[in-house]
Amino acid sequence: MTKQYVGISRDHSRSMWNITRPAARDFNENIRTIQEAAKINSIDTIISVVKCGVGAQARVDREVTNSNVNVVQPIMENAYIADGSGTPLFDSIGDLIETLSSVPDASDPTVSFLVMAITDGEENASRKWRTKLGAKITELQNSDRWTFVFRCPRGGRDTLTKLGIPPGNVLEWDQTAQGVAVASAVTASAMASYFVDRSKGMSSTTKFYADLSKVSVNEIKQTLNDISGQVRRFSVTNSDHGVDIRSFIERQNVPFQIGTVFYLLSKTETVQESKQICICDRASGAIYSGISARDLLGLPHYGAIKLTPHNLANYDVYVQSTSVNRKLVGNTVVLYCPMFAR
């Protein structure tokens, strides 16, 4: 059985105080996603968790140390305390490195490690690892068995890439309840995809987070099929907001069939594996589809996942509707694609 170690650094500095409940929900969602992904992909998964920035000394406290992910319990929302005087981010990562490196099979070439840090601030309180973390991360990443992932405030990516973290492994997020929810959905999707790739033999990644902003138009043209000539667009006005999808399509004087209508991804959605996805280039208006659309978005090819409109740059993503009563969102567009009728 494939073996996977996961380490999570959770920010408990004072600046997190106003989003502790969403942060607790986010952590619980991360654990649930890892548990489900480990089960689905038959991956033996061991997890460690540290709290970054605890109390007046801004300590790094170990909460879970090399435990099977299935025994890790969710935390109560009111139990997430943010009282730290600083953010020893580098020390928290270093502590996880020490913990994970000490396992008996750490040198086994079939074993991989994923370390994730979730923070609302930058490093400002480390003592042990402040100057040597970058070199250690580079050494471990070069082994092709260690992946480091960071969720940080907007503008924090440059600091982390200078530390050696691949840009595709950094997610910038907004420090609000909504920002936590969006980042949580993006991370759940990325984590599920990571475990699928691990089951296929991947040992590390530099593109943990899906990011269409880094995908060129030529890459999309080469990877997907241009179906622009077979698609009709219908605008959903403000007065159409909340109308069911079947009634709306029938008003356009075209036959409604399950699978022919694609709605704009405008909020976090759960997308089943059976649903097709279309990608629209806003500049040219060209519409592309194909099995590789999920690969470009970093999505697994089976299992329901949460998809969110994140880092889509000059593209729009449309998701196939398999419902007759989905409520449409005003000021959007739906695609009518007869070739996908079921």
Image: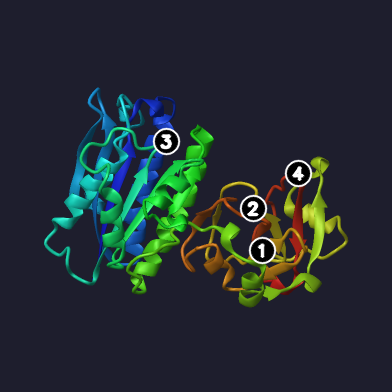
User: Considering only order in the chain, which callout, 1 or 4, is on the residue closer to the N terminus?
Assistant: 1
Which is closer to the viewer, label 1 or label 2?
Answer: 1
Q: CA distance from mark 1 to mark 3?
A: 32 Å
Q: Position of residue 122 (x, y in %)?
A: 39, 37
Q: Which residue is mark 2?
A: 265
Residue name at image x 34 percent, y 29 percent: 13
Category of crowding for the residue at label 1, using alpha-carbon neighbours closer than 10 angstroms: few (below 14), some (14–19), many (at least 20): many
Q: Are marks 4 and 3 in contact (CB under 8 Å)?
A: no
Q: Give the secondary structure at mark 2.
A: loop
Question: Which amino acid, mark 4?
Answer: Gly
| Disc 3 versus disc 2: nearer the observer | 3
Q: Nearer the viewer, residue 289 or 8?
A: 8
Residue with the mark numbered 1: 279
Q: Residues within 10 Å of mark 4 (few under 14, many from 20)?
A: some
What residue sits right under mark 4 in the picture?
330
Q: Is residue 67 visible?
A: no
Residue for point 43% across, 55% down: 169
Depth-wise, is mark 4 or mark 3 nearer the camera? 3
Q: Nearer the viewer, mark 4 or mark 1?
A: 1
Q: Is residue 281 visible?
A: yes
Badge 2 local density, few (<14 within 10 Å), some, or many (20+)?
Answer: many
Query: Looking at the image, is mark 4 or mark 3 earlier in the sequence?
Result: 3
Residue at 75% over, 56% down: 334
> Could you give the CA–CA distance between mark 1 and mark 2, rounded to whole angstroms?
10 Å
Per the image, label 4 sits on a secondary structure element best described as loop
